[in-house]
Image: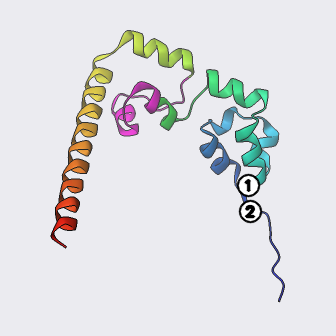
Amino acid sequence: MTSHKTAQSMKPATAAKKLGVYLQATPAEFQEGAVSRTELNALQTDPPAWLVELRRTGPHPRPVVAAKLGVSIAGLARGGVTEPLTTEQIEALKDEMPEWLRQERATQAEVRKEAARIKERNAERAARAAGQE
């Protein structure tokens, strides 16, 4: 019994997500073909000029926009941001700091603070449980 190792491949949308880029802004040849795991690794370790430029200037997908603004993806939707944004547009939003962005950043800060509190509480419980054994 011999095993054949086949190259894993993924849809362009999955590869774009893993690369943190907006699929519609990628070159046509990237959008049209499957991307192997080897090709993805090559793109990550030695990105071509189009990928470097796309990561630098955008347009960026929602998860990247949310991270750059310091809010959640749901917060973007609540703020009315549904389209991909360029780096320039993101910077303009940061400079303008509309009320929805200020609120969403505060909400995100509270969520992070609560997550840290829960993590600390669980670590204390685990330490106590380990000490009782």
Query: Mark 1 highlights which residue?
Result: 37
**Residue 68: percent from left, percent from top:** 46, 26
Q: Is residue 69 above or below residue 94?
A: below
Q: Are marks 2 and 1 in contact (CB under 8 Å)?
A: yes
User: Can I make out residue 35 in this image?
Assistant: no
Element under disc 2: loop
Instruction: Please tell me which residue is depicted at 78% across the width and 32% down the height of the picture.
Output: 48
Is 48 on the left-hand or right-hand side of 80? right
**Residue 91: percent from left, percent from top:** 48, 14
Q: Amino acid at mark 2?
A: Gln
Is 119 on the left-hand or right-hand side of 60? left
**Residue 123: percent from left, percent from top:** 24, 54
Q: Is residue 10 above or below residue 129?
A: above
Q: Is residue 39 magenta?
A: no
Query: Mark 2 highlights which residue?
Result: 8
Instruction: Please tell me which residue is depicted at 73% across the width and 47% down the height of the picture.
Output: 41
Element under disc 1: helix
Q: Earlier in the sequence, mark 2 or mark 1?
A: 2
Would you identify the image quadrant in which residue 98 lies? top left
Q: Which range of residues does the magenta coloring cover?
A: 66-85
Q: Amino acid at mark 1?
A: Arg
Instruction: Please tell me which residue is depicted at 36% across the width and 31% down the height of the picture.
Output: 71
